[in-house]
Image: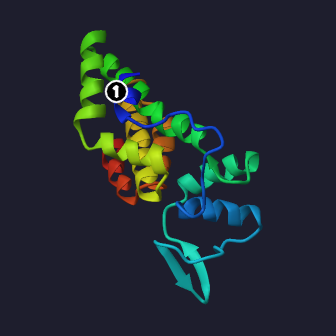
């Protein structure tokens, strides 16, 4: 609650959607629903290949947007952005700090420090507020990182670490460097 209060933006925006105009991955998901791989219009961060326009970003958010657009063709619902991008990181960070053996109070302080005292704060603010593709992918890679760390300091199930690796790689390619820790 402290984190969402500090974001200083309207969390509940019924009828608000992240559209193809603001996020090329939403445009790609809408194109997939139309049975195409190429985009309708050229926007920022797209590639032109054989007179067709393509998204240049890794596909994780496109997969998520594809499922969301099946429920609401207008775009990616803002409330879903809050739930999928805003809630997991505070919960996962607190769970990790508790798992490594610190008290509830100290876990709260460390989580608050991570969420509000690092560069993650403006990243989540931009991702949840505007849904820009760069910020959304950065938050998704952080979710993958926290999932990886929770499992690394937990039961060390390879399949969960594999999911975290795929999530991270499909949102930020450099996450593949985590593979050294897996080995």
| Residue 103 visible here | no
> Which quarter of the rendering shows the C terminus?
top left
Q: SS of the residue at dot 1?
A: loop
Q: Name the spot of residue 51 as percent of width and height, x first.
A: 61, 89
Rendered residue at 41%/33% (across/down)? 89
x, y (%) of residue 27? 62, 64
Closest to the observer: 130 or 81?
A: 130
Judge whether 145 appears above or below 90 on screen: below
Q: Nearer the viewer, residue 130 or 37?
A: 130
Residue 73 picture location, percent across and down: 73, 53
Graded by Cα atoms within 10 Å as few (under 14), some (14 to 19) or many (20 or more), the crowding at tag 1 reads few
- Judging depth in this view, the residue of 151 and 49 nearest the camera is 49
* Location of residue 159 with respect to 47 vertically, above or below: above
Horizontal side of residue 71 vs 80, given as left or right: right
- 84 vs 118, left or right, is right
Quarter of the image with the N terminus is top left
Residue for badge 1: 153
| Quadrant assignment, res 104 | top left
Measured along the vertical axis of the image, is residue 50 above or below residue 73?
below
* Residue at 43% in and 42% down: 144
């Amino acid at each position: 609650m402290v984190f969402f209060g500090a974001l200083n933006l309207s969390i509940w925006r019924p009828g608000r959607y992240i559209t193809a105009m603001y996020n090329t991955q939403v445009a790609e998901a809408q194109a997939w629903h139309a049975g195409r791989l190429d985009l309708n219009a050229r926007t920022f961060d797209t590639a032109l290949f054989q007179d067709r326009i393509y998204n240049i970003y890794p596909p994780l958010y496109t997969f998520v947007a594809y499922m969301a657009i099946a429920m609401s063709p207008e775009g990616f619902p803002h409330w879903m952005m809050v739930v999928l991008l805003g809630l997991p990181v505070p919960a996962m960070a607190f769970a990790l700090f508790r798992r490594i053996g610190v008290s509830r109070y100290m876990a709260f302080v460390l989580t608050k420090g991570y969420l509000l005292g690092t560069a993650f704060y403006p990243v989540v603010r931009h991702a949840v507020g505007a849904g820009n593709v760069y910020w959304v992918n950065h938050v998704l890679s952080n979710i993958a990182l926290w999932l990886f760390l929770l499992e690394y300091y937990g039961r060390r199930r390879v399949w969960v670490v594999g999911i975290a690796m795929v999530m991270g790689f499909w949102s930020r390619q450099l996450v593949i460097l985590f593979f050294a820790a897996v080995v």
